[in-house]
Each structure stands twice: as structure tokens, then as C-alpha cells.
Amino acid sequence: MAEAVLAVYRGDRESGKPVEYKVPLAPGMVVLDALHYIQGHLSPDLAVRWNCKAGRCGSCSAEVNGRPRLTCKTRMDSLPLESPITISPLRAFPVIKDLVTDVSWNYQVNKKIPAFTPRPGVQWKMFQKDVDRPQEFRKCIECFLCQNVCHVLRDHGKHAQYGGPRFFVRVAGLEMHPLDGVSRAKLLKEQLGLGFCNITKCCTEVCPESIHITDNAIIPLKERIVDKYYDPLFWIVRKITKTGGS
Amino acid sequence: MWWIQPLAVFIGLGLFAIYATLRAFQGHFYEWGPYLSPFYSPLIDPEHHWWPLSPAILVLGGPLGFRATCYYYRKAYYRAFFLDPPACGVGELRHNYSGETKFPLILQNIHRYFFYASFLYLPSLWHDAVKGFIWNGHFGMGIGSLVLLIDAALLTTYTLSCHSCRHLVGGNLDCFSCAKFGGTRLGLWRRVTALNERHMLIAWTSLFWVASTDLYVMLVAAGNIRDLRLF
């Protein structure tokens, strides 16, 4: 039977190293299956976070050969088997054990975002053409692969000043909602640090839900920031029409 | 193999920057018959009455600023020239990162002003494209006529596929059905979105073509090649 060698990170936030395991291949096998094989047959104490095994829960995120991916959606036959397949935890977050990281920082960021707040007296009636844009953002499964690959967090550690692509997607879904009446522009600029994003599109490349994070969420939000803070023409229009924007 | 894409972008943008700089400062071989190089359009003070340098220097700031602040090109040169990051998941050497929050990169926020300015250039490019079909007062067509026409069309498409354009025509609305002219703006937004999805392709095609158009006019004007007159 054909075999693959997996070099799986073993350790905690203080220290760790890749450990190699030989795993027999089966048709249709995904990386999470291989990790389960290791747990079941070779190393029962291997820590792996997973839940649905169907690409819906976003729990099994890891780095496969250096690329952030859902291990349940990464087929073994899509990977080169000549050399060991490296499986490491998400680099942007502290390791708890082996492949399990502490992603609780994301939930702290989430708390900063004002929830959906309908405009006073709004009529509760929506048309599909108005909710097409927010609906794309509702596909997010919070796997945090976009957060992990974003170099602002991953390489520059700007966790204190920056929200990350996941939360720009959430804010975009609220800002573009036809019934919402709250502006989050100041929050985006001052607390979520949208200006740190230099739109290199890595978040879009790794999104397992194929959300166009950069083009449909981040850049439109950057343009809204420009409307409010950097465009004198819009400022004059707002003063004349006495509106807060769109 | 992550380095292939940033290297290709580095070479592509680098070659264009060198070529455009040399041609902008050259100040010769930019016009032949009814053809005018897009690097020199609109042509201002070609007789040097008040501007002693190449006329291209007077006009290239607009297109250069539009490309330099373009959301696609930003991605391309942040990766290829600043290595910030060189590719997804590849580590960086620089540690004092401030993104687009400080001078000079905070000026990327004026992209829409270069978009507005492009509407001063496009009529001039279309004027040159139409003029390329008029030979001594009569309709005619050479290879250069077609080259100029395609150039104007590609630069117009590049401008209309811009992210700022997408925002201004309708993306800034939260509710199309509630806004004045919401239906019209939704239609415009959808059309610009369809173009915007191909913004990278259009950006590279138009960049290649504008340089090729200038090269063609230069070679014809310098007598290195003959323009083939179709009729």
C-alpha cells in the first residue's frame, strides 16, 4: 500500500519540532484523515482541533506545506509525496499544543464591532439586489485562515492595532446591510487599523469559501474611509446635503 | 516556487518604468503623420515656447499617479519591490511596518483623484485615435491607426474597471432600492464590477499596449520601420 510521510509539529508555545509519521494512503483521503490515523495508531496524544470534517465548521485550520488550509478539504493526492508533508499550526496565533492554537484574540476583536443596528423607523423589507453583497460575507466559517496568512498579523504582530481580514468582512457585511444605520468608519480607521492592510490579497487566496475578501470587503471599506476622511469633495457634499454619507 | 510571480512582476514593471522614463525624457520621435504617442498625449507646447523640456513630462504625472495608486498595482509592487510580503505565507525582512497609515503611503488614499484626472486624458487619447484615421483630410487606415485605436480602448477599459470607479458609481450605497437613481446605479455598479473582476488582466494588457504603441510610433517616426497603409 502506498504511504505518505507527514512531518507534524509536536510541542507547545515554549518549544516544539516536527515529528515524522508514516501513514498508509487510501482513496479520497484528506490530510485530516491522515492526522486521525496518527492519533488512532501512532500517537494518541496528538492534539488536533476538528469538528465537522466537511469544510463547514472552520476548526481544522493548519499549515500544510507552509500554506494555510483546512485539513479536511486538502486531499492527500493533491500533495507531492516525494518529500515529507509538513503540517504546522497557524503561525499568527500562540500554540496551545501541537496543531491547536489559541484563537481567542479574534473573539476579543469581534466584541469591538457594533452589532447590526436597524435605522430608526426602518421598514423591515429587503430586496435581493440589496442583500447580495452582505450575503457573500455570511459565507464566512471563521476558520481564521485569512487572519493567519495576513502578514500584518503573521509577520508584524500588529494584533493590538489591527482587526484582520475576517473582521473587515464582518464589518463590510454590516456596513453594506440595507437596514443598518450605524457607521463603523471611525472604528475601522482608528481601532481596527484598516490602513495597515496593503491589499496583497493573500486573505482572498486562502479563503476556503472563496469570499472575495479584498475586492468586495476591504477595498470598498477603504473607499468608504476615503469618503469620510480623505476626500474634500465628499466632505463638502455632506455639509451641503447634511448627510452622514451613503 | 513562490518567487516566480514577484520576479515576473519585478521584471515587467521594472522594464516598463525604465522604458517610460527614457521615452518621456527623450522628447523626440513621438509623432509621425496622423499618429501621436500616448506618452505625449495631450501634446502641450511641442515648439518649446515656454516649456524647455520634453512635453511628455507635463502630462505623464496623471497616468503615472493613477497606475501607482491603483489597488491592483499596489498589490503587485508591494509584493515584488517592497517584499511586503514577497508572497503569501513567506516571511519578511522588514520589521517597522506601518502599511498605508503614514506618509508617504497614506497618499494612496487619493487614488480617486487620479481617476477623476483620467477623464482629462481619455478624450485626448480618443481624439488621437480618431485623428489616426485621417490622412490629409481623408479617411484612411494604417497599422498605426489600429494600434492607437486599441490603445484608447484598453486605457478606457482600464479606467472604467477601477475600484474607485466601482465605488463611486454605486458601491458607496447601502441600499440600491432606497436611493435616488438606485436602479441606474445598480446597473452601472454591476457593469463596472464585471470589468473590475478582470482589473489585473486589463491593467497588464493596457500597460503592455501603451508601451507598444509608443514604441511603434517611435520606430515609424525614426524611420526604422514603415507604417503599412491598409487603405
Image (cartoon, coloured by chain):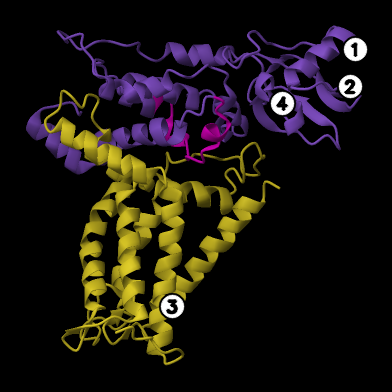
Chain colours: A purple, B yellow
Q: Marks 2 and 1: CB-CB under 8 Å?
A: yes
Q: Which chain is disc 2 placed on?
A: A
**A79 with respect to B64 (left or right):** right
Say what amino acid the circle numbered 4 marks: Arg
Describe the element under mark 3 as helix, strand or loop: helix
Q: Which residue is mark 1?
A: A42
Say what amino acid the circle numbered 1 marks: Leu
Which quadrant would the N terminus of chain A be assigned to in this image? top right
Q: CA distance from mark 3 to mark 2?
A: 58 Å
Where B100 sits versus B62, above or below?
above
Image x and y of residue A196, in percent: 47, 35
Describe the element under mark 4 as helix, strand or loop: loop
Q: CA distance from mark 2 to mark 4?
A: 17 Å
- The numbered disc on residue A75 is 4
Q: Residue at x 49, y 39 (%)?
A: B98
Q: Which residue is mark 2?
A: A21
Closer to us: A7 or A192: A7
Describe the element under mark 1 as helix, strand or loop: helix
Describe the element under mark 2 as helix, strand or loop: strand
**B184 with respect to B69 (left or right):** left
Q: CA distance from mark 1 to mark 4?
A: 21 Å
Q: CA distance from mark 2 to mark 1?
A: 8 Å
Q: CA distance from mark 3 to mark 1?
A: 65 Å
Say what amino acid the circle numbered 3 marks: Leu
- The numbered disc on residue B12 is none
**A118 with respect to A91 (left or right):** left
- The numbered disc on residue B215 is 3
Residue range (magenta): A190-208
